Image (cartoon, grey):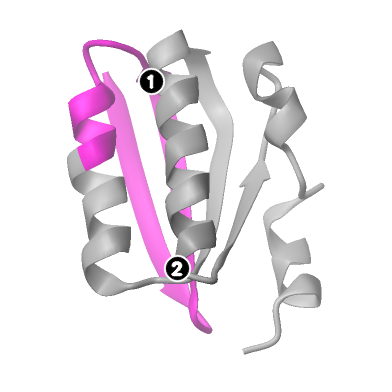
Amino acid sequence: MLKVLMEFRKGILFVRLFGKLDDKTIETFKNEVKEVIIESGIKYVVLNTYNLDEVSKEGVKEIRNLKKIIKKMDGEFFLYGGEIKELKSLVNLENELKVFERVVI
């Protein structure tokens, strides 16, 4: 099961994921997160994976894909919570609120 919480603050979309991002829940991620970002044209996204228990290879692929999409929109993608080894190379925030020091809107 994947639970998604989103909050939009000061031009930045905070996406918090809970549970598992795997083959069974990847469609939830695509529909609730990826499509919203693309359709809304949101340029700044913080993805918080701290509360994920598991991420499959497909989940990592979708996160990387989302990062590419945001870059193509001239935006910035931030990842917090890389306790899962497959995500450690993508982590670029030590906590969510540090994004306000890095993004000027």
Q: Residues within 10 Å of mark 2 (few under 14, many from 20)?
A: few
Which mark identifies residue 30?
none
Q: Extreme front residue here?
A: 72
Q: Is residue 56 visible?
A: no
x then y, percent, for residue 100: 72, 75
Segment tinted magenta in the rendering: 1-30
Kindly report the secondary structure that dominates the magenta region of the rendered protein: strand
Residue position for label 1: 21
Image-based side of 30 in relation to 97, left or right:
left
Judging from the image, what secondary structure is the residue with disc 1 in? strand
Image-based side of 49 in relation to 96, left or right:
left
x then y, percent, for residue 39: 21, 66
* Quarter of the figure that contains the N terminus: top left
- Residue type, label 1: Leu
Which residue corresponds to the image point at 22% horizontal and 46% vertical from the top-left?
A: 32
Which residue corresponds to the image point at 40% horizontal and 30% vertical from the top-left?
A: 62
> Badges 2 and 1: C-beta atoms under 8 Å apart?
no
